[in-house]
Image (cartoon, rainbow, N blue to C red):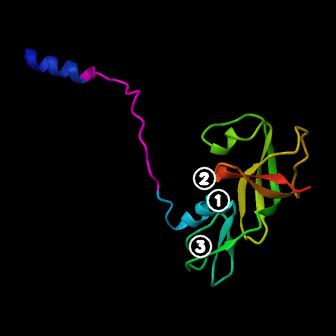
Amino acid sequence: MDGMAEKTKEKMERPFELEYRDWRPEYLYSLGELSPFFRELIDNARLMATKCPKCGKVWMYPRGDCPDCYEENEWVPLSGEGTVMSCSYVYFIGHGIDLLRYLELPFVYALIHLDGTETYIPHCIKPPSQKMGEVKTGTRVKAVFRENRRGTIGDFYFVPIK
């Protein structure tokens, strides 16, 4: 190998890496056919689901098309009330979930069957106290909306109905 080839090989084996600390990319994500769900969260603090005009199933979380009939779904409002199907108390906060910054420990992570729907949603419940067992299978819950909503799943959580 000649001298120039050796220097080129050395440069390729030891690349210079520079960490960019001032660059923060911004992205705009289109929520497409599910946009009405998020707009209702922001504008009206209301949960919306989708209903198939053919089979009548109500889907929450909403879907653009019925997964059973392949028909285009229609938007329907929900009461925001439901029943806990299963749950677990959470004592350690993970990362990446917007809602977790607004709930104190412990909170309950539950599978909730919202009234009038065919499906269950996984979501967080704020228990009335730190006493374990106050929220359990069969507990009735209702949606509570944060004051400053941004159009995310973290804009609402559930509390037990007294």
Mark 3 closeness class: few <14, some 14–19, many ≥20 residues within 10 Å: few
Looking at the image, is mark 2 or mark 3 earlier in the sequence? 3
Residue at the spot x=77%, y=58% of the render? 112
Label 2 is placed on what type of residue?
Thr
The residue wearing badge 3 is 67
Q: Do the residues labelled 1 and 2 touch (CB within 8 Å)?
A: yes
Residue position for label 2: 152
In the rendered image, which quarter is residue 100 located in?
Answer: top right
Screen quadrant of the N terminus: top left
Q: What element carries label 3?
A: loop
Q: Is residue 21 magenta?
A: yes
Q: Which sits in the foreground, 40 or 105?
A: 40
Image location (x, y in percent) of residue 34: 55, 65
Which residue was labeled with disc 1? 41
Image vertical order of residue 2 relative to residue 134, above or below? above
Q: Quadrant of residue 86?
A: bottom right
Amino acid on which disc 1 is placed:
Leu
Q: Distance between the residues labelled 1 and 2?
A: 8 Å
Location of residue 136 with respect to 49 vertically, above or below: above
State the extent of the magenta-drawn residues as a range.
13-29
Of 149 and 156, which appears nearest the observer? 149
Q: Does the stretch in magenta take in 141?
A: no
Q: Mark 2 or mark 3, which is nearer to you?
A: 2
